[in-house]
Amino acid sequence: MEYLSRKLGALKENPNFNYHPRCEKLSITHLMFADDLLLFARADMSSVDLMFQAFKEFSAASGLAANLDKSNVYFAGINDDEKDRLQQILHIPVGNFPFKYLGVPLQVRKLFYSECKPLIAKVVARIQLWTAKKLSYAGRSQLISSVLQGIQLYWSQIFLLPKKVLREIQSILRSFLWSGTSDSRKALVAWDDLCYKKTSGGLNFKESITWNTAAIGKFFWALAQKQDRLWIKWLHAYYIKRRDVWSMEIPKRLSWALKKILEARNHLENPMQCLQFEHDGKFSIKSSIGF
C-alpha cells in the first residue's frame, strides 16, 4: 500500500494530471481503509487515464488487482457524452448515491426514514433471536444496553438520524424490555426514567435523541479545535477559510450533514466565553463546557 500511495502521489508531478476540484489544496488523490480504495481526479481523459495507469502498474508489481465488477465510478458536473468517453477507459459500472460503506449509507443529503429501515430491521432481527429464550428483566435490560443500543449508536455517531426513526427504535426497545418481544406493550416505568443513572434509580439507558445530538456535537468540537484529521483540514481549506467557526455564517454550499455539524455549535459553549480573566493576566475556567 505504501508503494501504491507513492505511485498515486507522484501524479502531481505530471502536468497532464488534474486534481479533483475539491482535492487540490490538500493534494488528495486517494483514500484507503482496509481493502477499500477511493481514487479522486478531475473528470477529464488525461487525468483519469494517468490515475488508472498508475493503479495498473501497482497491480503488475504487487499482484494485487481490483475486482472491477465490484467497483464503481461516480461522476459529477459533467454531461453524458463525457461520461461515455471516460467509461471507455475505465470499464467500471457507474454508481449512484447513496451507497453503503461499512454498513451505513453514504450520501450528502438528509437521511430519509426509508433509508434507515435496515437499522430498524437489524434491531428487530436481533430481538427475534432472543424471544424464544426465557430472559429476565435484568437480562433484557443488559442486552438493550450492551447490544441493541450499540447497533443504533453506531449510526447515531455518524448521522443526525430522523427523530421518527429514533422514536420507533426506542418503542421497540421499550416493548422488548417489558414483554420480551417487539410487539407493543404497556411500559411499567417511563423510558425517560430508565435513562437515569443507576444511582438515581434508572437503568443507565441512553436517550436516543439527546445522545445523537451530543455525538454530532463532538464532530463540531473537533472542528473548532482544529484537530489533526483529514476531514477537518479539508473543511478548513475549502469552506471555513480562517473564519471563526463559532460565529461564521454557515456556507450554503455545504452538504446537509456538514451543515448539521456546524449547527451543533448551538448546543455548545464557546470556551473563549467561559474564561474569566484576572487583573494579573491569569485566567480560570468560569463554567464547564458541554451540553
Image (tube, helix red, strand yellow):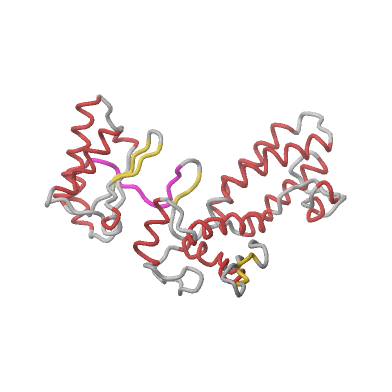
Q: Residue furthest left?
A: 15
Q: Residue 3: which quarter of the image? A: top left
Q: Depth check: give the residue in front, 94 or 142.
A: 142
* Magenta-drawn stretch, dominant element (helix, strand or loop): loop
Instruction: Identify the magenta region.
Output: 91-101
Q: Residue 35: say if magenta.
A: no
Q: Is residue 283 left or right of residue 231?
A: right
x and y, in percent, of residue 49 in the image: 16, 44
Q: Residue furthest front?
A: 280
Q: Which residue: 49% across, 59% down?
A: 225
Q: Which residue: 28% across, 58% down?
A: 25
Q: Depth check: give the residue in front, 270 or 128.
A: 270
Q: Which residue: 78% across, 37% down?
A: 140
x and y, in percent, of residue 224 in the image: 49, 62
Q: Residue 97: say if magenta.
A: yes
Q: Quadrant of the N terminus?
A: top left
Q: Quadrant of the C terminus?
A: bottom right
x and y, in percent, of residue 154 in the image: 58, 45
Q: Is residue 280 left or right of residue 56?
A: right
x and y, in percent, of residue 172 in the image: 72, 47
Q: Is residue 263 left or right of residue 57?
A: right
Q: Is residue 169 left or right of residue 225?
A: right
Residue 111, compared with residue 178, is above or below; it is: below
Q: Depth check: give the residue in front, 39 or 10.
A: 10
Number of marks:
0
